[in-house]
Amino acid sequence: MQFIPIKTRAFLPPKDDLFSLFKDYLPPLKDKDVLVITSKIVAIHQGRTVKITKKTTLKDKIKLIKKEADAYLKNQPHGLTIKDHTLTPYAGIDRSNANRHYVLWPKNPYKTAQNIWSKLKKQYHLKHFGVLIIDSFCLPLRWGHMGISIGFHGFHPNLEYAGKKDIFGHKIIQANSNLVDGLSAISGVIMGEGNEQTPLLVVRGFDKLRFTNKPTYKQLHINKHQSDFYAPLLKAFTSSEA
């Protein structure tokens, strides 16, 4: 298996063209490749940026976070939030590598991944292909950032073990391996968080993926009110619609 980082030019807010970046920097894609893309350049491509001026205050940022978040902690609206089925700080809003702009979370990241997948799959004449949009997030009780998926298309996110046998021959009742976020974590480490300027990466030769043309993101998501064992903690969040 290969993780092939792709160094590019600086991608410039408030708006830049993602497909011209692909044209200038993508290597020839092969069947069963997965193209990993940072959420920041997807958002800049969509024009999802807000200029930071001398008059911009913390109150302005908090207002922006509450507007963008699906839910937030009532007593800490500028901290941990829920956005597009993901637990993330600040509704995914970031100012690093953004040249005095806030970069928002991409709009409709799963649909966006599907649109990118459709165009590149046709362009490179691929039978099997995946697109994965990632962002950085923090694990509870741990320092440091790591990559997590926020949108993907072209493959199944999990490797299912239910019904298979363990090393002692006992049947596994319920277990999945989260492939999409595992790939996101490794890719995020390679792509970097600073001035590496590698917003694209190709995963090649990962034989555990099952490719498909259909949307599969619902296979990844758990309803927070049902079987998610984090549900008691998530009750502390206030819906932005409230």
Image (tube, rainbow, N blue to C red):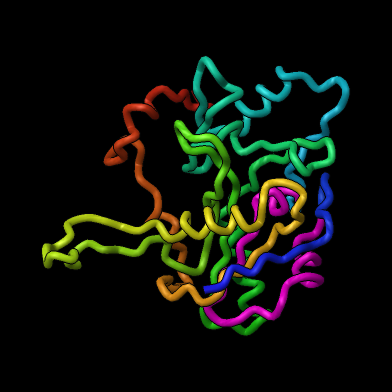
Q: Is residue 54 above or below residue 141?
A: above
Quadrant of the image occupied by residue 229: top left
Q: Is residue 14 magenta?
A: no
- The total number of labels drawn is 0
Q: Nearer the viewer, residue 64 or 173?
A: 173
Q: Position of residue 124 (x, y in %)?
A: 66, 81
Q: Position of residue 150 (x, y in %)?
A: 54, 50
Q: Does 40 sit left or right of 126 as displayed?
A: right
Q: Nearer the viewer, residue 158 or 113?
A: 158
Q: Is residue 18 above or below residue 70?
A: below
Q: Does 24 sit left or right of 31 as displayed?
A: right
Q: Position of residue 133 (x, y in %)?
A: 59, 56
Extreme residue toward the right, this view: 54
Q: Does 165 sit left or right of 44 as displayed?
A: left
Report the span colored magenta.
16-44
The residue depicted at 55 percent of the width and 19 percent of the height is: 76
The residue depicted at 65 percent of the width and 74 percent of the height is: 120
Q: Position of residue 21 (x, y in %)?
A: 79, 65
Q: Is residue 26 magenta?
A: yes
The residue depicted at 67 percent of the width and 65 percent of the height is: 5
Quadrant of the image occupied by residue 121: bottom right
The residue depicted at 81 percent of the width and 22 percent of the height is: 56
Extreme residue toward the top, this view: 75
